[in-house]
Amino acid sequence: MKVRIFVSLKPGVLDPQGRAVHHALDGLGFHGVQDVRVGRLIEMEVADRTSDETLTDMCEKLLANTVIENYRIEKLEHA
């Protein structure tokens, strides 16, 4: 089973990378951008029997810093 995990900073947490992207976009002439937040995408291939609880444990113990980040797990249909 293919799994995608989206990790993003919680609201209110400073995002220096997002700020740098916002500044660069403005410098390139893209003036309508109000805010930029940068996150990451983790794709994994796991055994079909992998439980939701196991995926949550992976996120909370390694893949996301739950103090400052939120995460969302998406299971993909088999192709």
Image: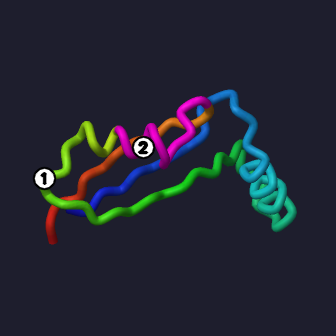
Colouring scheme applied when the structure was drawn: rainbow
**Which sits in the foreground, 11 or 34?**
11
Magenta residues, start to end: 57-67
Label 1 residue SS: loop
Q: What percent of the width, then of the height, locates residue 6? A: 45, 49
Residue located 50% across and 36% down the image: 70
Which residue was labeled with disc 1?
Answer: 49
- When asked about the image quadrant of residue 2, the answer is bottom left
Q: What percent of the width, then of the height, locates residue 61? A: 46, 40
How crowded pointer 2 is (Cα within 10 Å; few <14, some 14-19, many 20+) is rated as: many
Cα distance, mark 2 to mark 1? 17 Å
How crowded pointer 1 is (Cα within 10 Å; few <14, some 14-19, many 20+) is rated as: few
Which residue was labeled with disc 2?
Answer: 59
Q: Which amino acid does label 1 sit on?
A: Arg
Task: Return the mark for residue 67.
Answer: none
Residue lying at the far bottom of the rendered structure: 79
Q: What percent of the width, then of the height, locates residue 42? A: 44, 59
Q: What percent of the width, then of the height, locates residue 32? A: 73, 51
**Which sits in the foreground, 56 or 10?**
56
Q: In which quarter of the image is the N terminus?
A: bottom left
- Whether 54 is drawn above or below 29: the answer is above
Q: What residue type is labelled 2?
A: Cys
**Which sits in the foreground, 60 or 3?**
60
Residue lying at the far right of the rendered structure: 27
Q: Does the magenta stretch include residue 62?
A: yes
- Whether 57 is drawn above or below 78: the answer is above
- Residue 8 left/right relative to 32: left
- Whether 63 is drawn above or below 11: the answer is below
Label 2 residue SS: helix
Q: Does the magenta stretch include residue 64?
A: yes
Residue located 77% across and 61% down the image: 25
Residue located 59% across and 29% down the image: 67
